[in-house]
Image (tube, grey):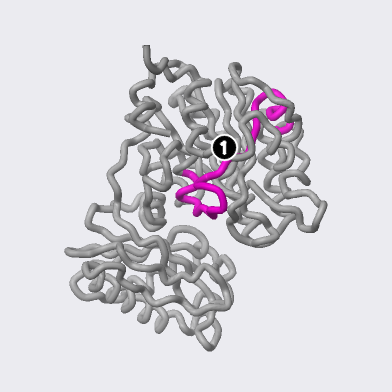
């Protein structure tokens, strides 16, 4: 998908698009021959939309590639994640309304648990409360690093924001998070000579954080990943002519939306509240990104049944969304998070595209195996969903004479 081409074809319209993202939607059977979480869920409303729309499986990045949440969402918004790359730290900063400058270096931090040998036993420190996070961030904020200003701010639960502000900083540093338990945190390594000083500052911060946290439990160590600087990208109004809004409770997803110029609408962390916000702002915007997080959290915790319940809760809210009479609805996930794997995976993600102008296929239930036979195909590039949504919303003109 070429943003420059789309910009040339965009035309005004009064239509409304809803993109509903069930985070980590795709799954796997717990045992051979069984159902995935989505297939096991009772989803009469999603099934009805699947029957009326066109379905398939979409790939956030490419075959065999396991995407992070940032690339997964960027692809859904039509931004090629191989071209538009940004570290998780920038998204975390924007997600909590931190005033990030072009010279800042930001990283997404996790409080974690390590044993007496420094080996990680829990990357999320038991998902400590946000209140506990706030206290720990206040302690870490007392660390004094030479020649830079340090910010350590709570995000949500075990997640925090780490920012360095100063001259000559570089984000070209490896993560300290090995992304697995049973390993020690990794030392930050510079990827270029210009990043040597920054890597030393990060290493000093991690060492001093360990000294401060060593007597705390379960949050007795920190992990950093996604060090990055703020990029300069075209926003969704420039690219698509859309007045876009995001309804997401978790800061990271608000961050990626803010990066693309969406208005951020406040919401509580449940689908009922998100649909209340959608309804109350329906007349103000023509594109809505609605994010449902709990399917992903359950998958990461390895809780198959809880992920099923999270999907069913979204399904119960679908009629409220359809009562608003959107012109186009896209329902999918940013990646797969099978409870069996307890992590993101490379598996393509089920998708429904519904509009007055779509060509319905033979799919009658919303699930991985059913969508594999859908009209969108089993390997649709996720970046192609946005131009399809725009076309179905009558927002793209003709190409060529």
The residue that appears at 29% across and 61% down in the rendered structure is 105
State yes or no: residue 110 in magenta: no
The relative height of residue 67 versus residue 349 in the rendered view (above or below) is below
Which region of the structure is painted magenta?
46-73
In the picture shown, does residue 185 fall above or below 57?
below
- Residue pushed farthest top? 401
| Residue situated furthest front in the rendering | 401
- Is residue 255 in sight in this rendering? no
Q: Is residue 369 above or below residue 108?
A: above
- The one of 103 and 215 positioned closer to us in this rendering: 103
Question: Does 31 sit left or right of 377 as displayed?
Answer: right
Disc 1 is placed on an element classified as: strand
Q: Is residue 371 above or below residue 26?
A: above
Q: Is residue 346 left or right of residue 257?
A: right
- Image quadrant for the C terminus? top left
Is residue 69 part of the magenta span, yes or no? yes
Mark 1, residue position? 380
Q: Residue at x 61, y 56 (%)?
A: 297
- The part of the image, by quadrant, that contains residue 186 is bottom left
Residue 334 x/y as whole percent: 55, 45
Residue at 37% from the left image edge and 45% from the top image edge: 83
Residue 378 drawn at (x, y percent) = 64, 38
Q: Position of residue 221 (x, y in %)?
A: 47, 77
Depth check, front residue: 52 or 129: 52
Q: Circle 1: is it few (<14), some (14-19), or many (20+) Cα within 10 Å?
A: some
- 258 or 397: which is nearer to us? 397
Question: Quadrant of the image for the N terminus?
Answer: top left
Question: Is residue 283 visible to the viewer in this orientation of the structure?
Answer: yes
């Amino acid at each position: 998908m070429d943003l420059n081409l789309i910009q040339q074809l965009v035309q005004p319209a009064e239509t409304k698009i809803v993109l509903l993202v069930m985070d980590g939607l795709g799954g796997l059977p717990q045992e051979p021959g069984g159902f995935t979480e989505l297939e096991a869920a009772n989803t009469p409303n999603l099934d009805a939309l699947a029957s009326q729309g066109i379905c398939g499986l979409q790939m956030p990045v490419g075959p065999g590639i396991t995407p992070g949440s940032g690339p997964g969402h960027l692809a859904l918004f039509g931004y090629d994640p191989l071209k538009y790359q940004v570290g998780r730290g920038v998204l975390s900063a924007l997600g909590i309304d931190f005033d990030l400058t072009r010279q800042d270096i930001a990283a997404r931090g996790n409080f974690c648990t390590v044993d007496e040998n420094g080996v990680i036993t829990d990357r999320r420190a038991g998902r400590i409360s946000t209140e506990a996070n706030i206290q720990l961030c206040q302690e870490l904020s007392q660390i004094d690093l030479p020649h830079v200003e340090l910010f350590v701010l709570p995000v949500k639960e075990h997640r925090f924001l780490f920012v360095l502000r100063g001259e000559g900083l570089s984000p070209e540093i490896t993560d300290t998070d090995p992304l697995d338990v049973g390993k020690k945190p990794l030392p930050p390594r510079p990827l270029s000579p210009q990043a040597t000083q920054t890597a030393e500052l990060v290493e000093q911060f991690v060492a001093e954080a360990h000294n401060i946290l060593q007597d705390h439990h379960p949050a007795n160590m920190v992990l950093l990943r996604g060090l990055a600087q703020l990029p300069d990208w075209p926003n969704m109004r420039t690219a698509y002519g859309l007045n876009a809004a995001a309804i997401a409770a978790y800061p990271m997803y608000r961050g990626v939306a803010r990066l693309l110029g969406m208005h951020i609408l406040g919401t509580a962390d449940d689908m009922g509240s998100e649909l209340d916000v959608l309804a109350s702002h329906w007349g103000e915007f023509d594109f809505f990104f609605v994010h449902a997080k709990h399917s992903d959290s359950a998958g990461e915790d390895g809780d198959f049944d809880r992920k099923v319940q999270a999907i069913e809760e979204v399904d119960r809210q679908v009629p409220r969304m359809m009562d608003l009479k959107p012109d186009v609805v896209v329902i999918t996930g940013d990646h797969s998070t099978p409870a069996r794997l307890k992590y993101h995976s490379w598996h393509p993600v089920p998708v429904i595209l519904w509009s007055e102008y779509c060509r319905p296929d033979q799919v009658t239930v919303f699930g991985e195996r059913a969508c594999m036979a859908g009209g969108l195909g089993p390997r649709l590039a996720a970046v192609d969903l946005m131009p399809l949504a725009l076309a179905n919303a009558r927002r793209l003109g003709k190409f060529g004479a």
